[in-house]
Image (cartoon, rainbow, N blue to C red):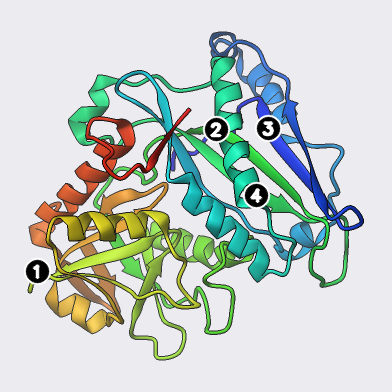
Amino acid sequence: MAFNLNSYPVVYRARYSAKAGAWAEEYLEKPHKKPQEEAALGEAEAAALIDSRNYYADMPLVSYTSQYGFGVFEGLKALPQKDGGLAIFRPDRNAKRFYNSMKGLYMPPFPEESFLKAVTEVVRRNAALGFRPAYKAEWEKDSFMNADSVYLRPFTCSEGGIGVNISGEPYVLVVATTVSSYFSPGTPAALVTDRIRATPKGTGWIKTAANYVSSALAKHEAAEAGFVECIFLDAVERKYIEEGSSCNVFFRLRSGELVTPELGDTILPGITRASIIELARDKKVKVSERRLSIEEVMSEGEECFLAGTAAGATPITELSWQGRRAVFNGGKTGELTADMRDTLKGIQYGTLPDTKGWMVRI
């Protein structure tokens, strides 16, 4: 996983005041040198600089977030464009989901317009300091699967507190870093885990930090067994596909139907998921959002791919469940999977026209 903890120097921070009923905002410029000077630092010096950007001495350590995972976050990308610019992919959708997630945890929700301004300004200010990846034509050779982008992480931290409670005066921060290929090289095989990610009437639809503990454990166990990803089943009947460790999942069946599990309170409403549904329907593909059993996938699955901000549209060619193994499309990336990946990446990196207005230029 090519996330990089070396955060860019400019950070956005806001704090909600219950008394004022408003958010106080600021941009912090953490310690930094010129990017080329940072790249030339020795290991110890580089680690010290990274630490200086990753620590915040003026925020509470003991909080509802640190003690109970009570917080929400988002992930979105600003992508270098073929024409030399930078553009963020569908930040309005992240803004809405962030608002809904905070509301779902009974926090004062962060205004969508403030979210949009914060993420674009963080990218702009860091780029002005030289912190941004440059477009490379070589990325086109593998459909941008190993291309760099600016990864934006908006997240909340609660006020200081101990004892199980909700947050009434949260912080919102937006940090930026670089990310490239999400999955490690190797056979793109997934394991159906027997762990449970989310239960009905729970928080599965909210992008809350607490949801990702089970996901991290299941993905670690899958990796220990030689798989790149895990797939969760439903918590009640234990037979319906839900999602991956941090992404949605699609299956093309032998009939030609492209199926992804229908949204409910146990499945995160992915922005890449929604985009792929729209792109596939534009290409006259029959797309269904419905319950999809593991038995149907094992017997009728022809292609499989993961969908998410970090994953993009990543092919899965094998799926293992209870000792059974399904191989999709002869172990090769399927035609529809490749089409969805290439179309999505082409729009994001500016090699295909953005006819939908999804890309917000910086």
Which residue sits at x=39%, y=30%? 148
Query: Which residue in the protein does label 4 denote?
Result: 155
Q: Say what amino acid the circle numbered 2 marks.
A: Thr
Q: Is residue 210 above or below residue 276?
A: below
Q: CA distance from mark 3 to mark 2?
A: 11 Å
Front position in the image: 203 or 348: 348
Marks 4 and 3, Cα distance to the nearest angstrom?
12 Å
Task: Tell me the number on the disc at residue 177.
Answer: 2
Which mark sits nearer the N-terminus, 4 or 3? 3
Can you tell which of label 2 and label 1 is closer to the viewer? 1
Check disc 3 and give the amino acid type.
Val
Q: Secondary structure at mark 4?
A: strand
Q: Amino acid at mark 1?
A: Gly
Instruction: Kindly state the secondary structure of the residue where label 2 is placed.
Output: strand
Where is residue 186? Give x, y as percent: 27, 46
**How far apart, in angstroms, are the residues tagged by discs 2 and 4?**
14 Å
Q: Residues within 10 Å of mark 3 (few under 14, many from 20)?
A: many
Q: Residue at x 39, y 19 (%)?
A: 134
User: In this figure, which residue is indicated by the disc labeled 3?
Assistant: 11
Residue 48: which quarter of the image?
Answer: top right
User: What residue is shown with label 1?
Assistant: 256
Image quadrant in which the N terminus is located: top left
Nearer mark to the viewer, of 2 and 4: 4
Q: In the rendered view, would you say 350 is above or below 23? A: above
Density class for disc 1 (Cα within 10 Å; few <14, some 14-19, many ≥20) is some
Q: Foreground: 65 or 222?
A: 65
Mark found first going from the N terminus, 2 or 4: 4
Q: Earlier in the sequence, mark 2 or mark 1?
A: 2
**Contact, mark 2 vs mark 1 (Cβ under 8 Å):** no
Q: Are marks 2 and 4 in contact (CB under 8 Å)?
A: no
In terms of depth relative to the viewer, which is nearer, 228 or 93?
A: 93
